Amino acid sequence: FSSATSTADQISEFSQMDEKAYLELDGFLSRIGKALDPVLTAPLKNPKTDGLTGSFDLMKVGWALRKLGKKEMPEALRFLPMTIQDVVDERFESVQVKALVAATSLKGSWLAPRSAGSAYGLLHHNPHWAGGLERTTTYAEGGPGALADAVASAARASGAVIRTGSAVSDIVVERGICTGVVLDNGEQVNAERIVSALDPRTTFESLTGQDWLEPEFLEK
């Protein structure tokens, strides 16, 4: 639906209480989203490396959170590391509404409903400047392929080299530091930084190798 109010009207068919709770959640997300706007749209400054500028930026975020009030500021700080399961269980009674809200939080991630911090997905996917929970979906002209082509073109224009059909068979680790990758044809490509878009299990257990990982990390 095009607005949170329209969605809430439909929710009322399942639960009058959930209709009210949905609108309250939308407003809550909008308020904390505006308070956290600097850290949602740009890298957070580091006081140790950025000096007074970094400290001042952190102070602005803290002041914005404080302006939420004595009741809502602690709730905002509590919300960010919560699981989305706990959020929907606390606020809604109908399974349909819980699934609706949880799905918007988890999409595009490897998180489960009980994963710590999964509640943050509501802010990430429903930013206040896009309408919050009443946001509308935006599609790239030409489809996802056209978007990928545009990103690739911009990357090449900046000097990036994109190699397709070159599967990675191993991540090279030397003295605990990743230094490159080995392709399935045996070629080794060295790099200062390695970014993996694969799932964590494949990245760490299959490519990096368990010998470099702490037992506690593997148990998670």
Image: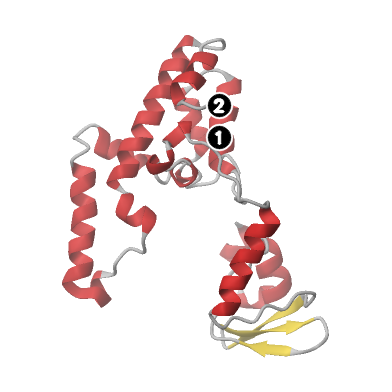
- Residue 98 numbered tag: 2
Q: Quadrant of the C terminus?
A: bottom right
State the separation of the CA atoms marked 2 and 1: 6 Å
Front-lying residue, 106 or 211: 106
Tell me which amino acid carries mark 2.
Lys
Residue extending furthest right?
185
Check residue 78 in the rendering and tell me which mark sits there, or answer none.
none
Which residue, given by chain and number where applicable, does mark 1 sit on? 102
Q: Is residue 209 left or right of residue 136?
A: right
Residue 45 position, x and y percent, is: 29, 67
Left or right, 35 with respect to 4, comes to left
Q: Is residue 154 above or below residue 148?
A: below
Which of 190 and 38 lies nearest the eye of the viewer?
A: 38
| Image coords of residue 156 (percent x, y) | 60, 78
Q: Residue at x 27, y 39 (%)?
A: 74
- Front in this rendered view, residue 100 or 143: 143
Above/below status of 191 relative to 4 = below
Outermost front residue? 141
Residue at position x 55%, y 34% from top? 102
Can see residue 77? no
Q: Quadrant of residue 31?
A: top left
Q: Secondary structure at mark 1?
A: helix
Check if mark 2's residue and mark 1's residue have beta carbons within 8 Å: yes
Amino acid at the residue labelled 1: Ala
**Residue 120 image point, x, y percent:** 45, 45
* Residue 201 occupies quadrant: bottom right
Image quarter of the N terminus = top right
Q: In the drawing, does residue 39 fall left or right of residue 103?
A: left
